[in-house]
Structures are given as C-alpha cells and as structure tokens.
C-alpha cells in the first residue's frame, strides 16, 4: 500500500470540493463527521477552525492506494483509516474518509486497479482547539502503513529506506505517461525517456558494486560520462555532487548516495591518507559554475533529512515573513534574509551561523546546504514564531476580505453594466475569466485584487489581493455613486421604452 501525506494546508473548502467531485465517483466511507453534504461538513469544519485564531493551517490530507492484489471492504477501510489517524496523533480530531475510483494512470497500468481513499483531518483537536504537531508525519505514516500491511494481510511493499532506487515522482510519472501517449498517437517521434535524475542514480548505484574504494567509484562514474565534484573543507571530505547530461545534484538527493551513506550503506571505502590527495586533484581539475565565493565551501555539502524536513516546515513561512519585513527580519534568536528573489536564509542572531537555506523550485522550496542545522529547541521556537506570523497574516487576510467585500461587487457591477468580461478604464482595469475577478491599476501587470465567487456562501472570496484603503474608498465614494446613477438612468430609460411601446400598442388597437 502506498500512503502520501500532503503538507498541512489552509483551504479545506477547495480540498473538499475535489474530494466530493462527482467525476471521481466519490463515496463517503465514514469518520467522525456528522455531515453528509459539502455545506454540512464545511459548517462543522469552520466551527472548529474559528476556535483558534493563531493559525489557519487546519487541514491534513492523506491518500492511501492499495496494491492491485488487495481487495478491501468499506469496513476494512474505515478500520485502516482510524488506525492511521490515531497513529499520526489525531486522536481527538474531526476526520473523514472518502473513496475515489482508480485514476486514469492506475487504470492504464492495470484495468483491474482497485479504488483508493482520501482522509481529510482537522489539525485542531476538539477539546482545547490546539493544533496537533505534524513533525515527521510522512515518516510516521510510512511506518504505520507497513504495520497496516501486516495486520490486514496486504501486499508487503518494500520500505523506502530499503529500496535500491528512488521511485519516480508523481510529476515524472505523469510526464512519461503523457509523452508515451504522444508517441503512440504520432505527436512525438521518440518514446519517453527515463528522467535524467533516475538515470544518474542508477549509474551512481552501479558504480558502488563490489564495495570499491572512493577513487575506483569516481573513475567508474567518469568513464560513464558522469562528472564528480568532491567537497573538501580543510582536511575533511564532506560530500559529493554529480552531473550527468546537464543535470547536477548532490549525492544526498539520490537514494542512499550521500557521503555518509555511500560508505555506510553502499560500501564505498575511504582512506584519508590514501584518497584525499587524489580527491583534491579531482576537485581542482573540474571547471564548474559555483555559487559566490563565500558559499563555495558549502554548496555541495550533503543535506540531512532534518534540513529537508525543516525546509518543508518553515521555508514558505519565512518567505511570507520577509514579504512583510521588506526582505530582512531580526529578533533576539533568528535573523531571516532574502538572498535573492528565489532564495532565503535563516541564521542564529548571536553568531550569524546559517541553519536553513532554501531555494524556490516551482511551488515548493528546495533545501540547500548550511554550516549548521536547527536544534529541537530552535524548531519549537520557529513554530511559535511562525504561529505569530500566521496570526498577523490572518489579520491581513480578513482586512483584505473586508475590502474585497466592498470592491468586488462594484467591479462586477461595472462589467455587468458594460456587458463585457474586460473593462479598461483610466485608472483601473477589471476582468472576469469565469473563475476569478481580477483588478489592476491600468498599465500595471500586478493585480491588486483577485476574488472568486463562492456559490455556497453567495459572496466574493479574497484570493490574493493587496487592496489599499485608498483604493477601497475610491470605489466606494466615487465609483459606486456613478454606478447607482447609471443604473437608475438605465431603469428609467427602460421604463420609458416600455411605456412608449405600450402606447404604440394601444394606438394599433
């Protein structure tokens, strides 16, 4: 069984709409939520969320997909779901389980693929309404899944820690499926290729056969066209990075290929006296583009699981904090800096040692090496700091929602009056694309309001706005009276036209 834990989110309505999509052939299997409809479930959810204003991260999403040989009844699934929810620590929380039909990719691989389930959990416990700590939820979920396989006599999946290679990511599998379909329909000349990262990983693992020395290991990779970059700090060998077909990564991003695991798991031997001088030559002879000089000694250091976990927990919150603090934040414990538009850093204020660095990679954040790591105490301190940040962001959100409540109906009325989806005025430009109502200052590319219409609550919902009070006042005091006057004139004109038509009709009679 495969279990995926999605990072804690703050959009239960969006998740529930997805889970209750008719096209998914959803079926509510159970849980402890009384509601059966979208509105009923959301009412229960919001009732709990409103009890804790310190954070809006109130939704945990877990998916569980059985092996094709496993057949489970709804009662089996309910027992498994309760085991998973309690095992993750959500013993006094709202939760629900929904079944979905097999995905297209699952059916493509096997027409008899079984359905899978989704578990939606409220992260606030129901007594004191505190948020349950989800530290290392992914690790806990994998351990629980292995226990589930044993207790329910299911197909035994090899634990990720024991797998020889990394599994393709969901994005990689979807790309390969899409390229295979294009190849079969003639839209692509070549069949899909295995992702370069996976090809590189196979070459690195193959080079560790028969427990070679580090020098033999490097020679084998170079012979296969893989460039190897040792990281040496002082007299210590700290890590390796690899490059193949233009793709470069640290050993720690490959399965059991960090410097430590190459020795402990893969069996590569290292003798400092014998090997370090040769590795210095390898490092000096390679012409690669590095980070700025002061970061050269850190760029290729392996990244620990703790660093990756801390990045997943805090990077997006640090980014939000820096947006509020104009790219720099300092208190007695932490200093946060924006190194570049897509790179952030967290340091200890007393000695400025870096404990977290992350680079934006699409919608996610990628962990970068640092000279030190966050301690348990610092993790808890950052949780408290980010909760305060979330409280401030929540206050900003509700202020923006208040302004959207004023401006959005006025903007919508303008588009209705002009009978168009795009209105370009002297000061502002508005557009409705059937999903989102967007407002810009005319000539600017950055929206100042984005709002979506919620049929359930019959109101506009803020979705990324930066309306100022000045703009809000302009629409309320200048635009709204104009719209009312225009609508009154339109009604009078229509009434006059109806009256004239009525008189003409009477004359005909």
Image (cartoon, rainbow, N blue to C red):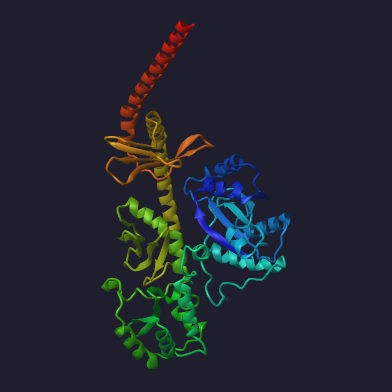
Residue 31 seen from this side: no
Q: Quadrant of the N terminus?
A: bottom right
Judge whether residue 96 can be spotted in this image: yes
In the shown orientation, is residue 352 left or right of residue 1?
A: left
| Up-down relation of residue 434 to residue 8 (above or below) | above
Q: Quadrant of residue 478?
A: top left
Location of residue 328 in the rendering, given as x and y in whole percent from the top left corner: 30, 57
- Nearest the viewer among 179 and 36 is 179
**View extreme (bottom): residue:** 274
Viewer-proximal residue among 104 and 288: 104
For image coordinates 52% across by 73% down, the residue present is: 166
Q: Which of the 4 image quadrants contains residue 250?
A: bottom left
**How many labels sit on residues?**
0
Q: 302 left or right of 143?
A: left
Percent position of residue 160, x then y: 56, 72
Q: How far across and down, in percent of the image, does residue 378 sit?
A: 43, 63
Which of the 4 image quadrants contains residue 258? bottom left
- Viewer-proximal residue among 100 and 338: 100
**Position of residue 451 measured from the top left corner of the image (x, y, whole percent):** 42, 40
Q: Is residue 84 left or right of residue 246?
A: right
Q: Residue furthest front?
A: 508
């Amino acid at each position: 069984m495969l279990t995926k834990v999605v990072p804690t989110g703050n959009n239960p309505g969006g998740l529930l709409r997805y889970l209750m999509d008719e096209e998914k052939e959803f079926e509510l299997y159970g849980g402890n939520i009384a509601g059966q409809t979208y509105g009923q479930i959301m009412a229960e959810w919001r009732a709990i969320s409103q009890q804790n204003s310190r954070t809006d991260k109130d939704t945990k999403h877990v998916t569980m997909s059985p092996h094709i040989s496993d057949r489970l009844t709804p009662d089996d699934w309910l027992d498994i779901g309760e085991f998973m929810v309690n095992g993750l620590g959500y013993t006094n929380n709202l939760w629900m389980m929904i079944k979905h039909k097999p995905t297209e990719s699952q059916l493509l691989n096997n027409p008899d693929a079984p359905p899978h389930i989704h578990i939606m959990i409220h992260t606030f416990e129901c007594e004191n309404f505190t948020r349950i700590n989800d530290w290392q939820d992914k690790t806990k979920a994998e351990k629980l899944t292995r226990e589930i396989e044993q207790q329910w006599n299911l197909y035994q999946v090899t634990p990720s820690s024991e797998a020889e290679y990394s599994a393709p990511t969901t994005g990689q599998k979807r790309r390969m499926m899409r390229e295979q379909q294009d190849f079969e329909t003639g839209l692509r000349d070549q069949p899909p290729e295995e992702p370069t990262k996976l090809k590189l990983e196979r070459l690195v693992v193959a080079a560790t056969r028969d427990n070679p020395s580090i020098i033999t290991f490097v020679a084998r990779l170079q012979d296969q066209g893989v460039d190897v970059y040792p990281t040496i700090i002082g007299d210590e060998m700290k890590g390796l990075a690899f490059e193949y077909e233009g793709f470069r990564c640290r050993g720690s991003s490959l399965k059991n290929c960090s410097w430590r695991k190459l020795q402990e798991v893969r069996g590569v031997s290292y003798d400092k006296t014998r090997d370090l001088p040769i590795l210095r030559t390898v490092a000096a002879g390679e012409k690669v583009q590095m980070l700025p000089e002061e970061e050269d000694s850190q760029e290729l250091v392996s990244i620990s699981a703790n660093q990756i976990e801390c990045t997943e927990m805090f990077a997006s919150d640090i980014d939000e904090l820096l947006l509020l603090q104009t790219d720099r934040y300092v208190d007695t414990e932490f200093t946060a800096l924006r190194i570049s538009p897509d790179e952030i850093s967290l340091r200890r204020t007393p000695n400025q040692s870096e404990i977290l660095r992350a680079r934006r990679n699409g919608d996610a954040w990628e962990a970068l090496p640092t000279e030190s790591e966050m301690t348990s105490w610092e993790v808890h301190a950052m949780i408290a700091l980010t909760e305060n940040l979330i409280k401030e962001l929540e206050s900003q959100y509700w202020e923006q929602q208040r302004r959207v409540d004023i401006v959005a109906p006025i903007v919508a009325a303008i588009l209705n009056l002009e009978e168009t989806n795009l209105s370009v005025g002297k000061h502002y430009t508005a557009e409705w694309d059937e999903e989102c109502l967007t407002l810009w200052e005319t000539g600017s590319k950055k929206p100042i309001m984005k709002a979506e219409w919620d049929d359930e609550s019959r109101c506009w919902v803020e979705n990324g706005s930066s309306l100022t009070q000045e703009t809000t006042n302009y629409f309320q005091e200048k635009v709204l009276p104009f719209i009312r006057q225009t609508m009154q004139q339109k009604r009078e004109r229509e009434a006059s036209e109806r009256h004239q038509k009525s008189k003409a009709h009477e004359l005909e009679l």
